[in-house]
Amino acid sequence: MAPINDAAKASTSSVPKSRLQRLKGALTPALDKLADVAIGVLDIRSELTLNNAECDALALRVAEITESILSRASSSKEMVQMYSPLIKPLQECIDDISMFLVDHVQSAFAPGLSRVPDNERIKIEIAAKDKRLTDVVGALNLVVNMTVLSKVSLGDTNPSVVFGSTTLTAISQRACVILFMSTELPPKPRVFHGRESTLKSIIARLLEPEPAHIALLGMGGIGKTSTAATVLHDNEIKTKYGSNRVFLSCDSVTTADGIVSALAVALKIPVSQEDDARALIMQYFESIDGSVFVVLDNLESAWDTTDRDAVEELLTELSNIDNLSLVITMRGQQRPVGVDWSEPLLPPLDTFDLPTSKTIYISNGGKTGGQLDKLLQELDGWPLAIVLMAYQGQNRSPGQLLTAYRAERTALLARGRAGHLNSVDVSISLSLNCQSIKDVPGSLELLSLLCLLPDGIETSALPDAFPEMSGILHIVRVLEQVSLVTRPVENEIKVLSPIRAFVLVSHPPCGPHLKTLEDFWIATVCMADALFGFEDGREEANAQITKIIMKGFGNIMSVLSYALKAPEVREEILDAVLQLNVFSLLVHYGDTWELMRAGIAAGRHTPSLQSLCGHMSLVQAMQSCLRGHHSNTMALIEEAKELSQDPIFEAQGILVVAARQVQQLALQATGLGKDVEVTAEKVSKLVQAAKEIVEAEADTSLIAWCIEIQGILAFATGNVEEAISLGEATIAAFEELQNGFGIARGQYILGSAFISQRKWEEGDELLRTALASYHKHSFGLGIALTHRILGKSCVLQWRLEDAIQEHTIAAETFESMGDVAETAMSMRQCSHVYVSMGQPLEAIELISKVILSYDRLGDKIRCAGCRLELANWLDFVGLYQESLEQHLVGLRLCEELDLQQAVAFFKYGTAGSLCKVAFMDLSAIDFEAFQEADRLFRQALLVFEHVEHLDPSLNVLTSPNTFHLTLEELRGVLKRDLAVIWAVPGREASESIKLGEEALAVFTKLDDKMEIAACKVILASIMVHDDDTRTRAMALLEDAFTMLKELELPEGSLALEDRRQKLLNWHREIVTVTDRSDSNVEQLEE
């Protein structure tokens, strides 16, 4: 549609203006004032620029409605007298619209002052004001039409005298139709979930002999009306109350008299102008033979106005009727006074949990998908938001909706014509514009500030967060009463996510109270100083500080993010961002990467902040060294150099690179990072270069860091003696600085080195001393890693119960930090210990959980490795078919990763499982499974015979344990197992014997007595069937028996003991079968 130009506006304004001016004079002063305001609204039209069409339509509607009402009022003296005392609510509504349009025109000439785009916010406000105008006009026409209709029905007045020559306007007629429709019972909701206990409680009270008085409270869109409608249609309710069930929607009713008039219409009670309508209604109810059930829906429209006292008086009268049960639904959490509400009081309806939210979303047609949980978490369990999102989700996936919601926010949650049941924005606007909010100055300001706190805030902290805001607790009570804030727990308040999103756009936080809120959270972050090793603090106090910052982490992130959008950023804000980042790294909690990037961007162009921004870039460079980050470390270092004026920044940058390369060396040892060309020599040169610079600058703190990195490097590359020397030097350097945290890091290096030398007591003591310091400084990562090292130490000492305890603590610590990968690794280590303890079922249960974790992380190779272990342990307990299934899943994962050797290794494992499955029923051996096993064994052997070294990915596959076989051993194992299935159809015995002998040669060279014995038993089982080789077979059996009996196994090595017993049993079976065969031959010869 083409835009309306000024000339066109002037033309369309002049006609209604002239008609309004002609109506003046014949009216009362109150009606004349209404005409003046409407004329003023028309004059504003020519100045409208932004949101032109919407504002213009609202102005024209004001003029149209005013003209319609004044025309009707001027039709007779009776109508003038009827309208004059009733016009005040409409006057206030049009005054409010006029002020809104004036403000809108003025703000259009001051672009750039707002911190957020106003366009969508203004459209939402227009919709809300249009809704209010409709409600007020409907209420006015309701009262007038009721009076007129009662006069006509009683026959005591000529309609033409009342109406004059003017018939009912279209608006008036529509209001009447809406009124009569709204008194009918609403339909029973098609979808109703999550309120079953509330429903049961209401119905039970309504079925009691005494009348019930129930207030169904809660925020807009929480499900009050649908709950009431479900109650009305309950079979037991219908049986008791029959046709005496009355439902009245008070949406368009703003006074007690309006409720009375609407009830009179609903009950078809003729009321004249001289009658006392209220008395007639009360008499009507009292005269009914039987129980009456009345629902007054959306009562806040009348109660939360200046007519509150009269509404409460009416409710008191209704509650005094002996046969009448009353249910009201109201926004907010405050019940009207004067009614003996049924005990126990029904609590306000709450938001839904995630499972119920899912049920409602799907029941309303929303598609399911991988991002559904995240999408619904954005809605905080608000039923209206969930239903409207489901409407949008009928043809879009949850992932698409999540992206759209983050861009459009609450504007997405709407359908059809704007209304409080069809639009989240309109529903919220109605609450923001209610009388309770208008009556309390500062309520919207506080609400907007609370919207910066996604995790809510303790009520006891409010005076500290807003020290200059007077009457804050009273304001909070009002916000809670109208359900704009909720109370997730007794002493905390919170604003739901969709309300936060809307208010931050429509009423962005600003002013002096915003600064005090920022300062409050800055002070909270600064408490972390005690954790960084620069202040002495008790462990209990530091733990409490960590808990406080963790609890406020989301709020701090939100407040700081908002502060960074200001035209000028305070240095204190950037300091807090940096401190929060260091805290996050220290305790391994939260993700502040993007917040740091935003901070650097906000401050880098302010000269006084450039050095601080450079320091932030350096910290990010350090952060990029951590696992899971893929940022360009060198680019961050260059950024830091550019911004900072610190002369030793170059050295700090070099140390950051060195620290990262030490990480890469450690990863190379486990098969990760193999594409990065890093050598210990290169890292050592980097550290030495940095050390020369910092020594020249006499920076003792960085000198100590250099020594620490050298110690970590030595330990990572297996230079244990050097690591011990450097660990001691690290401790000494940090002792000079009185830095307890640094001392602990040195003790960790030294203790780990002693453990690797099997100096258990020295290593244990150092590690536990470091552990105590880590606890004092709330260094979660250090705590977890130290327990992991102690767990490995316990395994090496065969203290398996202690190992379980250490690895469990490590897992729990990693889990508390949100590190799923490291939690899974520690649980995996625990499962291995359970197997060593002879508790495979516990290991199976634990490794199954680990698989789920790696699957969520998308770590296919470790997921495959865990399935390999699970398969082996299922095999150990005789679940051969289940073991085969796990091998096949792992095989597919390795094929997807295109890891040739890992695929070959899984084929080897799958072949072993097939052999066991083939023998599950000895009466029907599965020779096809045998043949498939033979094929897989040969394919695996072919791969490993044509490679020169093992792929490091095999170490990752079996991590945390290193791959325990050399390439030569692996070839021997494959030949050994191929020899085992010598009976496979189509294979000559000589081929199997050759494979067995080649395997025996490998293990003899390695002096692996268990495998030597195994190979001899296998060869004997083949040779014993041939007269020419039977003598050698018996000799091999005798050698194997002696070797197995004399074999010394480590204490508690249950898996090895189990293998020895199986080989001895096999030996016994061969001997028994051979003896039986010889006996049969002798009998035949005799």
Image (cartoon, grey):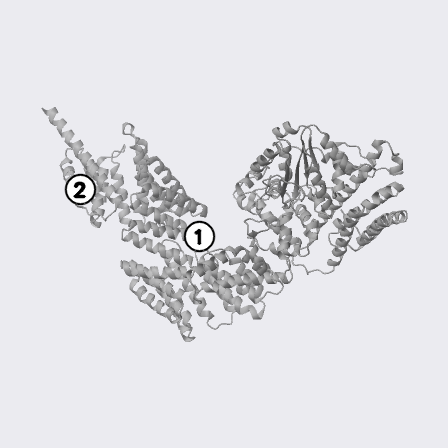
One can see residue 234 in this view: yes
Question: Residue 703 falls in which quadrant of the image?
Answer: bottom left
* Count of marks placed on residues: 2
Disc sitting over residue 225 in the figure: none
Q: Which is more toward the observer, 331 or 525?
A: 331
Disc 1 and disc 2 in contact, CB within 8 angstroms: no
Measured as percent of width and height from the top left, residue 951 is found at 35, 50
Amino acid beneath label 2:
Ala
- Of helix, strand and loop, which one carries label 1? helix
Q: Is residue 13 left or right of residue 571?
A: right
Which residue, as the protein is rendered here, is positioned at the far left?
1086
Q: Is residue 821 left or right of residue 66?
A: left
Position of 231 relative to 89 (above/below): above
- Of helix, strand and loop, which one carries label 2? helix
Give the alpha-carbon distance from disc 1 to disc 2, as whole Å. 51 Å
Residue sitting at 42 percent across and 44 percent down? 852
Measured as percent of width and height from the top left, residue 878 is found at 31, 36
Disc sitting over residue 1040 in the figure: 2
Measured as percent of width and height from the top left, residue 761 is found at 28, 59
Q: Which is more toward the observer, 549 or 756?
A: 549
Question: Residue 235 falls in which quadrant of the image?
Answer: top right
Residue occupied by mark 1? 816
Between tags 1 and 2, which lies in front? 1
Amino acid beneath label 1:
Ser
